[in-house]
Every structure is written in structure tokens, then in C-alpha cells.
Image (spheres, helix red, strand yellow):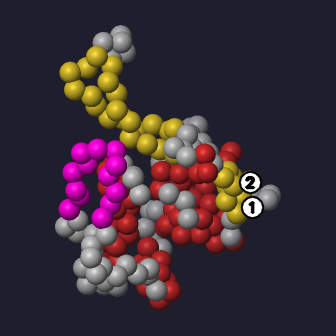
């Protein structure tokens, strides 16, 4: 209800990526996200339209199990687990830092998200002819989005596994620093 076109596109992009893996793994015949036509937003009162007669269904438990069986060997398996077991938005998950995870009490503190924001002025304060866009960590649009999310064991295990991947990557690429969970 009233989401920005960029929010809708990024959400569809994540879902489409998951479904594309399901097609590759022969769990689905086609990716239903292909060919989505986005309506042009002409004002702030834009509301996504549900097609008449369209029955939207969630994935069945068997489909979820098959998806995760195929996704298990992908780079972002742990992210998929985290999203499933927390209900977080992708921008919230990618803005997480390790300091936002309380492993002792098993919860995540969500208080920021990644957004694409327009830049209208250059470093000297001069207005640009055409704005460009950057990704930036910001606070959520709504205060209700600031919350503590309880963690199930599967999500905790996924976070530990992700942390191990990060440590291995740092050794492999000799990187230091960088506390972000998603990168």
C-alpha cells in the first residue's frame, strides 16, 4: 500500500532470484516474476493493483523444503533462512551488523534499512542537472519497523554459518574490518 516503485522492484528482484534458482533446480517450470509490468507512478497515491481474479498463494511446505534443498549450496543460503524465519525485508537484513544480533537472548534489533536515495546536489552544494541515486543505510520510514525480532534456532544457526563464511572470505581475500552481515 503506497510503496515506492523502487521498493516494489527490489522486492520482486529478490523473490525472482529465489524462484529462478527453483527453475534451475527443476522445482518450478517457469519463474512467475518474469514479465512483470510495473505501472508508472504519477503521484504519491500509487497503490499496487492486484489482478482481478488472481489467487495469490503462499508456497506450500513441500515447495519451501524443495527450494531450500536447492538453495543450500548457494552463496546466500543463510540469508534466505534468515528472511524466512524472521520476516525481515531484504533491506533490513542487508543493513544488519553483528552488533545488532543478541545471541545470548536470541533476538535481532532492527532499526535501519538500505534504501536507494536520490542525490540532487554535488559536494560543493551546486544543484545537479540530473539527480543520481546511491544506496544508503537509513532509519525505517515507519517507527513501527523498529523492533526486536526473536530468533529461532534455524536463524541462529544460519547467522553462525554466515559469520564463518565471512571469516573464511576475509582470510581468502585478506580483507580486514567490515562488520556488516550482508555484503
Magenta residue check for 45? yes
Tell me where residue 103 appears, x and y as whole percent.
Answer: 75, 57
The disc placed on residue 102 is 2
**Residue found at x 39% / y 52%:** 3
Q: Does residue 16 sit above or below 141 in this rendering?
A: below
**Residue found at x 34% / y 57%:** 47
**Residue found at x 44% / y 62%:** 75
Magenta residue check for 50? no
Q: Secondary structure at mark 2?
A: strand
Left or right? Give the position of 67 relative to 17.
right
Q: Secondary structure at mark 1?
A: loop
Quadrant for residue 128, please give it.
Answer: top left
- Residue count near mark 2 (Cα–Cα under 10 Å), binned few <14, some 14–19, many ≥20: some
Q: Does residue 141 sit above or below 85 in this rendering?
A: above
- The region drawn magenta spans 37-49
Left or right? Give the position of 154 relative to 123.
right
Q: Is residue 2 visible?
A: yes
Left or right? Give the position of 166 relative to 121.
right
Q: Residue furthest bottom?
A: 62
Which of 52/129 is in front?
52
Mark 2 and mark 1 in contact (Cβ < 8 Å)?
Answer: yes
The disc placed on residue 131 is none
Tell me where residue 135 appears, x and y as whole percent.
Answer: 40, 39
Tell me where residue 157 appears, x and y as whole percent.
Answer: 65, 67
**Residue found at x 45% / y 37%:** 136
Q: Does residue 47 sit above or below 59 in this rendering?
A: above
Check disc 1 and report the residue beneath it: 106
Main secondary structure of the magenta stretch:
loop
Quadrant for residue 70, please give it.
Answer: bottom left
Q: How many marks?
A: 2
Q: Give the CA distance from mark 1 to mark 2.
A: 6 Å
Q: Residue furthest right?
A: 104
Amino acid at each position: 500500500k503506497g510503496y515506492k516503485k523502487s521498493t516494489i522492484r527490489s522486492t520482486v528482484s529478490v523473490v525472482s532470484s529465489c524462484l529462478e534458482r527453483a527453475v534451475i533446480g527443476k522445482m518450478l517450470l517457469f519463474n512467475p516474476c518474469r514479465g512483470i509490468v510495473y505501472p508508472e507512478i504519477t503521484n504519491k497515491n500509487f497503490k499496487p493493483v492486484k489482478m482481478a481474479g488472481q489467487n495469490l498463494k503462499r508456497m506450500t511446505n513441500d515447495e519451501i523444503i524443495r527450494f531450500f534443498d536447492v538453495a543450500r549450496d548457494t552463496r546466500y543460503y543463510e540469508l534466505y533462512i534468515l528472511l524466512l524465519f524472521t520476516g525481515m525485508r531484504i533491506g533490513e537484513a542487508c543493513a544488519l551488523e553483528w552488533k545488532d544480533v543478541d545471541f545470548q537472548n536470541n533476538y535481532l534489533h532492527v532499526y535501519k534499512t538500505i534504501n536507494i536515495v536520490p542525490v540532487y546536489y554535488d559536494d560543493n552544494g551546486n544543484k545537479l542537472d540530473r539527480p543520481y541515486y546511491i544506496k544508503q543505510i537509513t532509519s525505517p520510514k515507519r517507527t513501527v519497523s523498529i523492533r526486536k525480532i526473536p530468533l529461532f534456532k534455524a536463524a541462529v544457526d544460519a547467522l553462525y554459518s554466515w559469520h564463518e563464511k565471512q571469516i573464511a572470505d576475509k582470510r581468502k581475500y585478506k580483507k580486514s574490518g567490515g562488520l556488516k552481515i550482508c555484503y
